[in-house]
Amino acid sequence: MTTEVVAPQTFPQRVVRFYHDVVAEMKKVTWPDQPQVRSLAIGVIVLSLLIGAIIGLMDLLFQSVLVRWIPSLFGG
């Protein structure tokens, strides 16, 4: 069994190697076009507003019901 001994790299060599690896990986990325970005952004905004509205309604419900109900449990 043979093992290959690799000489340790200096910090600047590691930085350059990292940069080249990043550039190589970025060339593999498939970037979305503008209509895809717009469509997904609108979807995220709509979903965020919907979830915010649901949480707001739950908050109002819990405030009106639980704030009156919990003290009555303790004789208040």
Image (tube, rainbow, N blue to C red):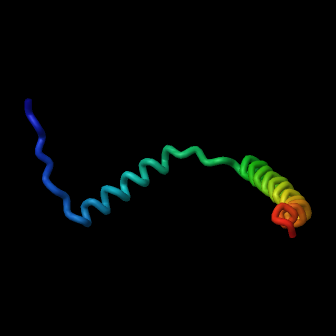
Most extreme residue toward the top is 1
* Front residue of 68 and 75: 75
- Say if 15 sits above or below 32 in the image: below
x and y percent of residue 53 in the render?
86, 58
Identify whether 67 is placed above or below 28: below
Quarter assignment of residue 15: bottom left
Counting from the top left corner in percent of width and height, residue 45 is at: 79, 56
Q: Residue shown at 34%/57% (left/top)? A: 18
> In the rendered view of the protein, which quadrant contains the C terminus?
bottom right
- Of 29 and 66, the residue lying toward us: 66
Residue at 66% x, 47% y: name it. Answer: 32
Residue 59 at x, y percent in the picture: 84, 62
Q: Is residue 39 left or right of residue 10?
A: right
The image quarter in which residue 49 lies? bottom right
Instruction: Classify residue 34 as left or right of residue 2.
Output: right
Residue 58 in the image, given as x and y percentages of width and height: 85, 57
Outermost residue, bottom side: 76
Of residues 69 and 76, the one drawn nearer to the viewer in this rendering: 76
Looking at the image, which residue sits at the far left?
Answer: 1
Up the image or down, 1 lies above or below 58; here it is above
Residue 73 appears in the figure: yes
Q: Residue at left 81%, top 65%?
A: 74
Q: Hey, which residue is sitting farthest front in the picture? A: 75
